[in-house]
Amino acid sequence: MFMAVTDANENHAFRHESLQKTLTGIPGLDDITMGGLPKGRPTLVCGGPGCGKTLFSLEFIVKGALQFNEPGVFMAFEEKADELAANVVSLGFDLEELQREKKVKIDYVHVDKSEIEETGEYNLDGLFIRLGYAIDSIGAKRVVLDTIENLFSGLSNEGILRSELRRLFQWLKEKGVTAIITGERGENTLTRQGLEEYVSDCVILLDHRVINQISTRRLRIVKYRGSLHGTNEYPFLIDDEGISVLPVTSLTLNKKVSSESISSGIDELNNMMSKNGFFRGSSILVSGTAGTGKTSIAGSFIDASCKNKEKCLFFAFEESPAQIIRNMSSINIDLQAHIDSGLLEFFASRPTLYGLEMHLVAIHKAIKKSKPSVVVLDPITNLITVGSVSEVKAMLVRLIDFLQEEQITVMFTALSMNTIVNDQTDEGVSSLVDCWLMIKDIESNGERNRGLYIMKSRGMQHSNQIREFVITDHGLELIDVYLGPDGILTGSAREAQILQEETGEVLHTNALGRKDRELLRRRKVLEAKIDSLRFEFESAEEELNKVYIEEELKKEFMEQTRQKMTDIRKGAGYRNEK
Amino acid sequence: MTEGDLLTAMPENEDEQKYVLRLFVTGASPVSVRAINNLKVILEKHLNDNYELEIIDVHQQPLMVKDEDITAVPMLLKKFPLPFRRLVGDMSDYEKVLRGLGLK
């Protein structure tokens, strides 16, 4: 039991040892291979003609010398040293200088069948000696054999060559150099001479495909003994800085999120969202039919961001930068000023320039280089011309993934040409984007107006209203859509309705005034009537009062008179009784 | 017989017509020894003394290996007369050696 544990530990330690890797310095490749090529072992790089094998291996050597201080030997079987040097001058590699500094050694091995006569048994000791000498003379840690299969065209004894190659690769391992062996792709095998049989630690396949007249380079790690590695086909790009491979997907969904907001550049639009703008690091889709002002919204967003000192990148797939700048200046957005201040950069390319993957790689590269905080792609739908909808979607997933990782806010514009494409956009992108602005055409009364609404905005309250979107010469404006008695009114109909209602108002107030005066008059008449009636009543009352008083007075007087009469009668009666 | 003509013509200006040969071998390995022996027999038989043969050990002269673009060993370089040829192997195939040297 105890023994077993020890064994496991030893195994583990041994495995750890065997997994040592050498960084290639080729951007992206080291991510896919999770640390580079197997250290001290040969790696086979194979592919068809023109797929970039030589450049790949040369970059491995040059980057090793420049970045990792690992001198390298490049043994060329195809091109002469000066040809090689000339080929990579455009990439900024100065092979001559590196050779003078003893960081790189290039050995051109020429095998010409026409001047060779095979007269019996032989071996490749000459090659071993040369390679060994080259390695030792500069203390090389890296070796490239490009393309060793050329030996087979010069020498015909395959049996000898095969056993010698096997010995060579073994010898390279013993030397402890990290080697790349390139091989031309065969009919049904990875290499014509089946080199993969001998080099089995790591095999990388390069591919150059042309689909729909657009070429895409791809790279795949066929095998990598004892190491995890990305298994997909990864697109790679050869440009003026050499090879860059795109590690296309991060498999996890554990990105940071920000609750900070970033202004859309249109105040009214900001007000439609509870956070007063988009979330930083979110993805925004602006979709609409042709001519609805998608680019203007993007321009306005860029303008606002630049004014907040954010670095912006504008990828234009439809218009040239100059055209966009001119067009934006017509709505009072001065992009040129932002370019001059270095906050805004344009990257314009025709979609058909290269394949989708290449676009992605190019976008990646540009973003990595200028590290913006805001990115605009205008319009993504143009990319469909070079790929199917699903491919574009896959590309956008990866792009958004990457941008979110970097906390970059991205705005895409998408053209929806008709309902079908619109549906595709819905399906394709809506699940990816955090915020979706839709611009709809509202057609009525023989004119077309734009209505903007927020289809979705993850993580915040937003207005559900359709606003009329107006492009004026001083910027973009959102106007509350006018709800008339007959439904939504926009454009001139809205203006007309407003005018009509204003007229109505005036007439109404006028009518009201007349009625008021009439009422006042009536009131006065009535009040006058009331007064006269009151006076009448008062006089009647007075009349009545007069009768009452007279009656009273009469009553009082009669009482007095009767008293007097009684008194008089009493006196007379007394006398008679006596 | 063109070869006969060549051979008879050669002694007249001996210095210029001398074969210049360079043989690269790896030390005293069996194949190298075989190559040297085989070659000497052929040369003695066909060229008499009319040749200059330099035998070089690749281990001793790595720079020359590079300069002469040596890959397979043993390798014999026929530097003169032209055309330049490379003879690879232990020189056991007499026919090919003669053809390579332009003696047949």
Image (cartoon, rainbow, N blue to C red):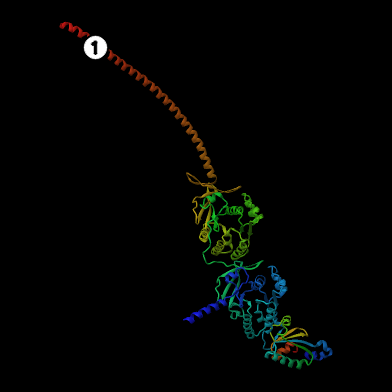
Residue A487 vertical position relative to residue A566 in the rendered view, above or below:
below
Q: Is residue A375 visible?
A: no
In the rendered image, the vertical position of residue B52 relative to residue A569, given as above or below: below
Tell me where residue A392 appears, x and y as whole percent: 56, 63
The image shows residue B57 at horizontal and vertical percentages of 72, 86
| Side of A480 where A147 appears, left or right | right
Q: Which amino acid does label 1 sit on?
A: Gln
Chain ID of residue with mark 1? A
Q: In which quarter of the image is residue A321?
A: bottom right
Q: Residue furthest left?
A: A577
Q: Position of residue A213 (x, y in %)?
A: 61, 66
Which image quarter is the C terminus of chain A in? top left
Picture quadrant where residue B91 is located:
bottom right
| Depicted A194 relative to depicted A234: above or below | below
Q: Position of residue A179 (x, y in %)?
A: 63, 77
Q: Is mark 1 on a helix, strand or loop?
A: helix
Residue identified by numbered label 1: A563
The residue lying at 42 percent from left, 26 percent from top is A527
